[in-house]
Amino acid sequence: MRGLIVAVNIALVTLVLVAIALVMPAAAAAQVDTVLARQYFAEADSACKAEGGAIWGVSLCGPMVFADARTGTIATNQPAPDAPRPRVLGYANAAWKWGDQRWSTFVWSMIPPDSLQLRIRLFMHELFHRVQPELGLLDTNAPAPNHLDTEMGRYWMQLEWRALARALTTRGDARRAAIADALAFRKTRRGLFDGAAASERASEITEGLAQYTGTVTAARTRAGAIADAVRQLQDEAAQESFVKTFAYPSGAAYGLLLDAYAPGWTRRITGDDDLGAMLARAAHVTPTTDVEVAARRYGGAELLAAEAKREAQRQARVAALRKRFVEGPVVVVPRGKGASFRTRGVTPLGDAGTVLPQFRVSGPWGSLEAEQVLMSADQSLLTVPGPASIKGDTLTGDGWKLILNDGWTTRADGQRLLVVPADSTSS
C-alpha cells in the first residue's frame, strides 16, 4: 500500500556517517552519545529511504543534527557547515537554515530512547518540516488558536477527536456516520469563536501534515498507523492545553481517513486547503444535523462536567498569572529570534498575550532563559516577573536569568524595567 502506508524496514542498516561532531570532550549525562547517534541516524536513513518520496513526491532524506544545549555537544549525519550554529540547536525540534541548507534539528534528550516507532515518528515529522516550504504547505502567519484553552473550545475539540477515533476504527456506514459527527463538532466549535477556522486550518497544515507523515512512515502496517493515531487522540485529550499541540493528532487522523477516501490526496493538497472540508468532499459526508444528540453518543455530558471543573481551575490560574506578569513589577525584553519553549502548558491571557513555559531566546540584546515568560499579543515583547537582581550584565529574578550584551542596559518605566539600547533617548 505504498503511498498510503509505507512499510519501514525496522532492521538497522549500516550507515557511514559523514560527520559526528562533538564540541565538548568533557563527559556529561546529557551530552550527545556518538554511538547511539549513529544508530539513530541509521534508523532515520532506513525510514526515509523506504518512504522514497511516495507520500509527497520528494525525498524526506536530508541533513539532521542532534544537539544538547547544556553541554554544547552535537552530532550530524553529514559535514557540519562552516557557519554559525542556529541559536535553536539543543532547544527545539525544528527545521532551520544552517549554512546553505535547511536542517532537521533535534533535542537529544527529547529523542525517545525506548521506542523505535516513536523515534521514527519524530524523525520523519521533522524531516517533513525540512521540505515543507518547497511543497507550499507551511502557514505560520495565522494567530494561535487560543480558543482551544476555553471550556467550549476544549469540549467540542474532544468530541471531534472521539468521533475521529470511532471513524478510524470502523468501516462502511458506521465510519461515515462518525465522520459526519466529527465534522458537526468541528463546525459547531468554529462557529463559536471568531477566526477559529483560519487559525485551526493553519495549524493543521503546518503541524498536522508533519505528524501524519511521521505516523504513517513509522508504522509497519495501516492497522499499526491507525492504532497509533487513535492513541495520539486519546493522549492529547489528557493534556493541560491544546493550543499548540491539537493539530498533531488531528492531522494524523484526518490524513489517515483521507488515505481511505482520497488516495493520492497528498499530491493535490494546497496550503489553503482544510483537512475537514477535504474529507467531507471525499467521503461525500455532510455534518450531522442534531449536534446535541450526536454529543450524547460520545459521552458529552460527562465531558462537559469535567471541562466546567477545569475551566474554574483555569480561571484561577489565569488570575494568578496576570498578577505575576501584568499587575506587578516586571522586566520587559524585545522578543529576539530563535526562541524555543515547551508546548505543553501554554496559557493564553487574552489581550495581555500568552504565557509560554521553559522559554529560551537570544537577540541583539543578549539571552534569556525562563521557567515562564509572557509573550505579548503582537509577539514583539517578552515579560518576566520582577523584581530583578542586577549584577553587572546579568539580571535574575523568580525563575529566570537574563544576560545583556554590550551596548544594552535597563531603564525604569513605572513598574516596568525595560531592556533598551544603552544610547536610547526615548522616554
Image (cartoon, rainbow, N blue to C red):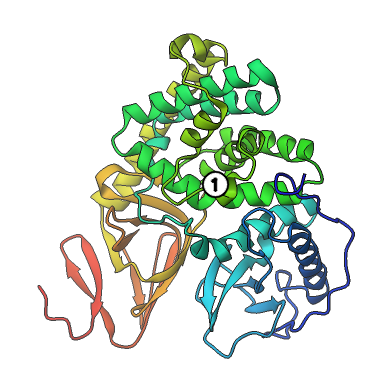
Q: Which residue is mark 1?
A: 208
Say which quarter of the image contains residue 383. Answer: bottom left
Instruction: Report the residue at 56% width, 61% height from top.
Output: 129
Front residue of this view, candidates 228 and 33:
228
The correct choice, above or below, for 310 with respect to 99 in the image is above
**Residue type (three-letter) at the residue carrying disc 1:** Gly
Q: As rendered, which of 50 and 315 lies closer to the eye?
A: 50
Q: Residue at x 30, y 68 (%)?
A: 333
Give the position of the N terminus as an image quadrant: top right
Q: Position of residue 138 (x, y in %)?
A: 46, 57
Residue 373, given in percent of the width and then of the height, sits at 39, 57
In this rendering, does residue 115 appear at all?
Answer: no
Compared across the picture, whether 227 is left or right of 357 comes to right
The correct choice, above or below, for 377 with respect to 287 in the image is below
Residue 70's place in the image compared with 330, above or below, is below
Q: Residue at x 53, y 51 (%)?
A: 207
140 to the left or right of 327: right
417 left or right of 384 in image: left
Q: Quadrant of residue 14?
A: bottom right
